[in-house]
Image (cartoon, rainbow, N blue to C red):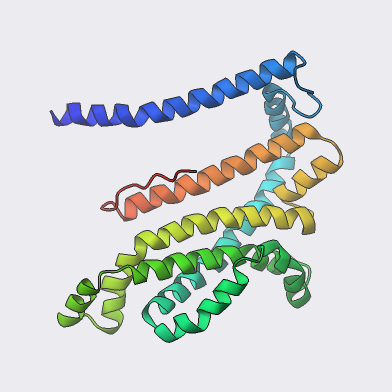
Amino acid sequence: MARQGGKAAAGRAAHPAALSVLSVLALLSLWEWAAGGGWVREAFFPRPSSVVAQFVVLVRDGTLASHLSATLTRVAWAFLVAALPGVAVGLTMGVWRGAREALDPLFAFVYPIPSVLFLPLAAFVLGRGEPARVLTSAVTSFFLVAANTLTGVRQLDRGVLEAAVHYGATGHRLFFKVLLPGSLPWIFTGLRLGLGFALIVVVAVEMVGAEQGLGSLLWLSWQTLKVRDMYVTLLVIGFLGLGATYGLERVRERLLPWQPRVEVRR
């Protein structure tokens, strides 16, 4: 019975995945047919088969690898710069009312500003180099991680906290045994969002202020009307976002197996 139940659950899980794949394949087939039949201008909407062929060309000549490496390095550094301080600040704001009251106005003022607009200021302070690009790319991610961590601490059951204190969990024991584990689901939500936004802002920063990176390749492809290169770059950026989102989700499932999986609807 258990095996039959497991097979049924696996079948139910596989059905939406198969439907998603079939819908993508149907869309690509329609696009291929429309471009090949002249229904859309192939100069602007090249056939998917020609985009795949150009992807192979860019992989073989090393162009894609060099730009991808630059982008991944910046995303990794931006995510690190955002995640560590973001978790620390969020936890501090959650347990210390004074910090929350002091930083709330700053969060409300800075967060709505698009991160890429901080590039000139960061370049003025740090110079026109990688530190300015990384810091600019980390701004929005920092606020997302901090805000979600704060929410995670604030939503903890006060009865649980009082019981923990009653049984001797104070100071660092209260922090590591109660506050941090109880906030982890929200922290991972913040990390997931932060990583996605780090990729978005890195690409935007590369479009306006870098010679290497997927954003730079995308902008150069548009300027020189290399449409197939542009579509290849968009394809790679999309897969990076997909991998980042579901990769962190798998990590969360491993570290927090008691938490139900949340389906994100867009």
**Residue drawn 75% across and 38% down?**
230
Looking at the image, the residue that sits furthest to the left is 1
Residue 84 versus residue 55 in the image, above or below: below
Q: Position of residue 201 (x, y in %)?
A: 65, 57
Farthest right residue in view: 224
The picture places residue 216, in percent across and down from the top left corner, at 76, 50
Q: How many marks?
A: 0
Front-lying residue, 58 or 173:
173
* In-front residue for pair 220/262: 262
Q: Give the position of the N terminus as an image quadrant.
A: top left
Eyeballing the image, is 27 above or below 84? above
**189 lies left or right of 239:** left
Residue 130, can we see it?
yes
The image shows residue 202 at horizontal and vertical percentages of 66, 56
Image quadrant where residue 64 sits? top right
Give the residue displayed 44% in from the left and 64% down from the top: 148
Residue at 53 percent of width and 59 percent of height: 194
Q: Is residue 210 visible?
A: no
Image quadrant in which you'd find residue 95: bottom left
Left or right: where 76 falls relative to 32? left
Q: Is residue 167 left or right of residue 183?
A: left
Q: Residue at x 82, y 35 (%)?
A: 226
Locate residue 247, reporting x and y percent: 46, 47
Quadrant position of residue 65: top right
The residue lying furthest to the top in this view is 37
110 or 125, which is in the foreground?
A: 110
